[in-house]
Amino acid sequence: SFVLTQPPSVSVAPGKTARITCGGNNIGSKSVHWYQQKPGQAPVLVVYYDSDRPSGIPERFSGSNSGNTATLTVSRVEAGDEADYYCQVWDSSSDHRVFGGGTKLTVL
Amino acid sequence: QVQLVESGGGVVQPGRSLRLSCAASGFTFRNYGMNWVRQAPGKGLEWVAVISHDGSYKDYADSVKGRFSISRDNSMNTLSVQMTSLGADDTAVYYCAKDSDLVRGAPFDNWGQGILVTVSS
């Protein structure tokens, strides 16, 4: 099945930009969704179909997808952005949804 | 607003069965595909199963195929999963999650709060 690879952790200072990658074979040909999960809470969709944002999600969250890497970018990082972030795609060959292993974003 | 409330979790012995339910409200339940996603303690998210809006299509992760059965009752706005032959690897928080639209592979735009299933003797 399709494998998504994320770095286990990313650290960034407040006010700076965090970039969380999601690698997969020709992932640029798929639609990527991103979820934020804070401790003890359910995941929340923050970016979908590569770069769209649900209502209520700050413009500081953006996404891109090309080649073998999709990226979630969090601009002007705030302490409240500290969370685990997961990428997800639909694998058409198996017709299954697939999640990346998750990345813990730490705000220094 | 959309609400998804899971129930039925708890401690179950290895090899036994358990049924989880998810009560949906705040949207037209019969119009959306629904899923179960689980998260083992300290681990990442794992998609478990999907059912189409009308129940005609169902699919499962390889890890649960043949042991789990997803179903829905559109008259009661309820999603369920029957889990059999449970093992320690099935210990997890189970979330019900709503598809955002009818496109295959749509994102999950709403999640329940999750329910813990612990498989232990």
Image (tube, grey):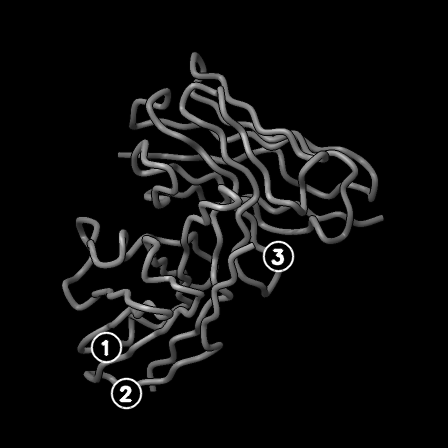
Q: Chain of mark 2?
A: A
Q: Residue at x 17, y 49 (%)?
A: A55
Q: Chain of mark 3?
A: B
Q: Residue at x 47, y 64 (%)?
A: A4
* Residues at discs 2 and 1 in contact (Cβ within 8 Å): yes
Q: Is residue A70 above or below residue B64?
A: below
> Could you say whether the residue bearing mark 3 is in a helix, strand or loop?
loop
Q: Chain of mark 1?
A: A
| Other-residue count near label 1 (Cα within 10 Å), few / some / many at <14 / 14–19 / ≥20 | many
Between B105 and B64, which is closer to the camera in this rendering? B105
| Other-residue count near label 2 (Cα within 10 Å), few / some / many at <14 / 14–19 / ≥20 | some
Tag 3: amino acid: Ala
Q: Where is residue B80 drawn, in percent x and y?
A: 56, 28
Tag 1: amino acid: Val
Q: Which mark is residue B40?
A: 3
Between A71 and A45, which is closer to the camera in this rendering? A71
Between B23 and B56, which is closer to the camera in this rendering? B56
Compared across the picture, whether B68 is left or right of B99 comes to right
Q: Where is residue A101 drawn, in percent x and y?
A: 51, 66
Q: Where is residue B28 drawn, in percent x and y?
A: 30, 22
* Chain-order first, disc 2 or disc 1: 2
Q: Which mark is residue A77?
A: 1
Mark 3–mark 2 distance (CA, rounded to whole Å): 30 Å
Between B95 and A93, which is closer to the camera in this rendering? A93
Q: Which residue is mark 2?
A: A13
